[in-house]
Image (spheres, rainbow, N blue to C red):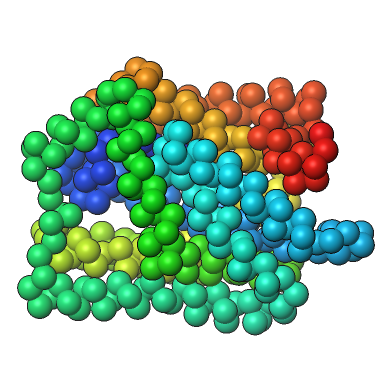
Amino acid sequence: MAILGILVINIQSISMPSIARINPATYGGFEGANYIVWLLSHVFVEQKFIVLFSMLFGAGVLLFVSSKQSKGEPALKLHYKRTFWLLVIGLAHAYLLWDGDILVTYALCSLVVVLAYNWPAERLVVAAVVLLSVPFIQQVETVMMLDHGMELGYWTTTPEELQQEIAVHQGSWSALAADRFGSNVYSQTIAVVDRAGWRYSGAMLLGMALFRWGVLSNERSSEEYIKLVAGCFTAGITITVAGVAYLHYHDWGSVAGFSWGLFNYWGSILVSISYVGVVMLFCRRWAGGRVEKALSSVGRTALSNYLLQTVVATTIFYGHGLALFGQVSRVEQMGIVLLIWVVQVVLSVLWLQRFRYGPAEWVWRSLTYGRA
């Protein structure tokens, strides 16, 4: 569910100029069905599935290390080797295909979060909240500075800048690769140290805690999952919707635009936790069914599907393919998302009927263990 969900947001970054994500009212159609698509994606998807993906990654780190230790294998050595190759895959993904890569950040974060693999759940939660609070506090401080007259050039863009960005993405692969180099360097260094590393590391630790509590492995009672869904979903959606209302109330002003993300920052975490409960209840009710098997096939090939999403989407929107960048409305984007989902589900099911791992997973495992 996490790997499919993140495409709803990622496709916006791949198909439209960056201002459409920063200030959606300025580009991409913002009335009628297009507005509804944006509103639903922001409330129910924006940041929710990447947080869920991050929590699962953290749980995966814990599961990997614990499994290797139980077998008497050098757990930490294998973890760091595994992380190194994830970093290599992420760098290739970022510089060859798309500057929205998350794998490099995950690899860098996992170098640190693995040190907490033997912590009890309560300690993991405390550490997660502390880490998650750092970017939030930084953002609050920035907003307070903005209220005293700081200008925000990022909130708007000139027609010339807009056309230049569209032209680059519709142009040659080499020109776009040169353009995204600086963006990649920033996102993989300054952005990680400044905010992204704190948020994603915190989400990973939270995932470790949920795994230790048996939440991610469906070991809690149905009543507990129902309470988890009801409480976290209600609170998270309320906070997120309040952010949208706040932005509308201030008529999409620049200062409000910089601060409205504070609402979704915590709202997305709560909603992502509620999604865990939804999936657990779904699996409990329809375990072994066709839908569960189809979706689990996507999950078992998550890395391959993440990379496939980028390959397909960039081929559709960038100049080395159909060059539709900046030409597709938000509603049309969702049609493309649905088509990619269908392709991914079908391919994942067919692939796992013949092979144990996805192609990218097989490469990653082979490099980690030093054998095919």
- Which quadrant does the N terminus fall into? top right
Which sits in the foreground, 119 or 230?
A: 119
Residue at left offset 30%, top offset 29%: 175
23 to the left or right of 53? left
- Which quadrant does the C terminus fall into? top right
Which sits in the foreground, 323 or 335?
A: 323
Q: Is residue 217 visible?
A: no
Which sits in the foreground, 21 or 245?
A: 21
Whether residue 202 is situated above or below residue 47 in the rendered picture: below
Whether residue 57 is situated above or below residue 136 in the rendered picture: above
Q: Can residue 89 be seen in this view?
A: yes
In the picture as drawn, the residue positioned furthest to the right comes out as 72
Q: Residue 314 appears at what percent x and percent y?
A: 41, 28
Q: Residue 128 appears at what percent x and percent y?
A: 55, 74
Residue at left offset 63%, top offset 76%: 124
Q: Residue 320 appears at what percent x and percent y?
A: 37, 20
Q: Quadrant of residue 36?
A: top left
Q: Residue 262 appears at what percent x and percent y?
A: 32, 68
186 to the left or right of 24? right
Whether residue 258 is situated above or below residue 168 in the rendered picture: below
